[in-house]
Each structure stands twice: as structure tokens, then as C-alpha cells.
Image: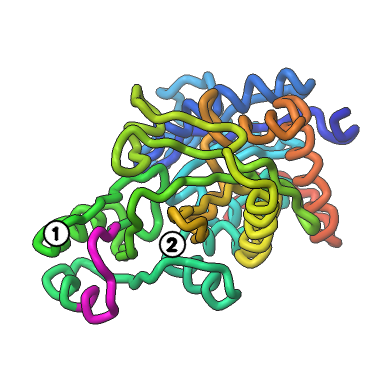
Amino acid sequence: MRPRSVQFVVVLRGGQSAEHDVSLRSSQFVEAGLMAAGYEVAAIDIDRAGRWRAGGSDRSTANVSQAALASLDKADVVFPVLHGPMGEDGTVQGFLEVLGKPYVGCTVPGSAIAMDKGVSKALARAAGIPVLPAFVAVAADAETAAARAQAVSLTLPIFVKPCNMGSSVGVSRVDSWDALAAAILEATKHDPRVLIEQGLDAPREIEISVLGNDVPDASVPGEIVPGESFYTFEAKYGDSDSQLMIPAELPMDQSESLRALAVRAFSCLLCRGLARVDFLLTKDGEAFLNEVNTLPGFTEISMYPKLWAASGLDAAELFRKLIELAVQHHHSTRTVRDTSSCAQKLDP
């Protein structure tokens, strides 16, 4: 059953990042799932310029932001279905904290840490979680990065990734040192900092869904079998030859070890609520943390809900649990209640 105090959930969708359209697809699944779980649902659209409006409101109306705030005021819980910068990186979470609204997903620190591949990999390494050799660079390093990479014993292939971006946007596989500079410049179109990371020879891509606050649980592992050299944006959201193997074909002890490692990574990066933890698995069975995604894709083909379904938690129960976790965390961390409206809090 849903938490008794929660009836009305507001979904935030769209956003300013390159993953705007992915968010819109995810929100369709989330909104349908929340309604199936018995909640009243409304949406707030965030356009690419950062303007907020209540879903269905007239774009020409002068006070569309006030209408969005009115919708937030009524919300018992807010569900940010936003991917990438200005949505998944702690910015929106901080805004909701200021408003005093319970929300689904990680808090500001966990969102910001997990979003930044350079920071999250450094923290994971310090905690003893296996990660691949890597370093962070900026556009000014493009011409010298190849020499630096070789100096720290990186070997081809390597991957260049924007530090703060998801859905494989801006990611390049580099098979020639001469191509590294161009890959860095391409990645910096999406974020000024980029991660230059050791690649592996045909690794298996294993994903695990994590759910919980203080005592998180992990789903069965799933495997992405990409039709290309790696799981590109097009492979994730377009027509491709990629396959999802749920559950992944792994020995039981390795499956349990990866589930435990996923929970360790989740806790190490200060996550709560939900995240999808991704690993790369070598031919010898050695696992490396690839990323922790705090607002994973929620489309009809996305791994996060599919893995929980395979673990015995259907979509309606998953959404009830996410709302319950949001309310629990809110009540455990806010001892003083400010009952003023969103508009009053933002009124200069």
C-alpha cells in the first residue's frame, strides 16, 4: 500500500541537458507507474532554456512559473525524472531541499558526487572499490594528453568521457593516440572536465539496481550485450542490435559478490533512494566500477525497473517503495518544519 500521507506526486521532466528527450521518455513510464500505484500525478515541464511550467499550461501565459510553483506547493512528494546536468547533479535536489519538499532519489551530496565521474572514481578508489586507471583533463590539455596517458601507462583503447554527463553523450572510444585530442575536444562540448580512462578488451557490461536508504538492497545483475564496440546513446535509446540479459549469466558467488560491491559503491558515494550501479567485467572475471547513475533511465526498455521486476518487485510496488523512501528520509532529516508556501519562500 502507498504511504497514507502521500496522495499527490509531481513529476519533473525535460530539463536543460542533452538528455532532455530521454527524460521525456522516462517520465511517461514513471507517470503511468505512479498512477497504477494509486497516486494522483501531475507534471512540471522544464524546457531547454530552464523555464518551468505546469504540465498542460499555456506556454504564452506570463506567469507560467507561478503555476509551476503552485503545483509544487500541492505536492506531497516530488519525483525528479531529470537526466544529466541541472537535474541529476544536485542542483534541482538543492532547490527542493530549500522548498522543504520530500523528493525521490539521492540528496545533494550523493547526486553531485555520483554525477562527476572524476570525483566518484577517486572516492571509489580510496574506498578500495576497483576502478580502471584514469585521469581528468580539460580542453587545454588536448595536445599533451597522449603523452600524459602513456606516461601513466594507459594503453589503447582508451575512453574519453565528459565528467558530468550521462547516457553515453559525448563518449568516444579512442584506438589511436592521434585521435585523442579530437575526442577530448568533442567531450568538452558537454563538460569542461573530461575523464580519460583505460579501456578493456571486449568487457561484459553488468548493471545492478540498488534501492534503499540506510540499508539498501541490490537487484539481480543484468547484462548489456551491445551491438557496437560500447553501449552508445543510439544503442541505449534507438534501434540497435544490443540485447539485455536479465538475469546475467554469472556464477552464483560472482553474482552475490557484484551485488555486495554495488551496495558498497552506493553507500560510498552517499547515495540514497535509488541508483543503478554499472560494472565492467573482464574475460578473467575481474570487475571494475564503471559508474553510479543516481537517476537512471526509466523508459519502457530501461534496466532499472526491469532488474527489479526480475527480482520480484513489480513496477507499482517499485514506485510505492521509492515514494516511501523519499518520505522516510524527509522525516528523518527535517526536525523543524517551515509551513510557508513555495511562493512565499521565493518572494524577495
In the rendering, at what x and y percent does residue 302 appear? 53, 31
- Residue, disc 2: 117
Comparing labels 2 and 1, the label whose residue is closer to the camera = 1
Q: Residues within 10 Å of mark 2 (few under 14, many from 20)?
A: many
Residue 151 covered by magenta stretch: yes
Give the residue drawn at x 30%, y 50%: 171
Q: Nearer the viewer, residue 250 or 183?
A: 250
Question: Which type of secondary structure does the marked residue at label 2 adopt?
Answer: helix
Q: Which residues are magenta?
A: 148-159
Residue 221 covered by magenta stretch: no
Q: Residues within 10 Å of mark 1 (few under 14, many from 20)?
A: few
Q: Nearer the viewer, residue 211 or 264?
A: 264
In the rendering, at what x and y percent does residue 7 appear? 80, 28
Q: Nearer the viewer, residue 222 or 266?
A: 222
- Residue, disc 1: 176
Spatial separation of the CA atoms under disc 2 and disc 1: 23 Å
Left or right of 253, for residue 122: left
Give the residue drawn at x 47%, y 36%: 46
In the rendering, at what x and y percent does residue 112 appear? 53, 61
Left or right of 168, for residue 328: right
Say if residue 98 shows up in the picture. no
The answer to whether residue 167 is above or below residue 188 is: above
Give the residue drawn at x 18%, y 56%: 175
Q: Give the mark, 2 or 1, whose residue is nearer the N terminus.
A: 2
Q: Quadrant of residue 193?
A: bottom left
Q: Quadrant of residue 167?
A: top left
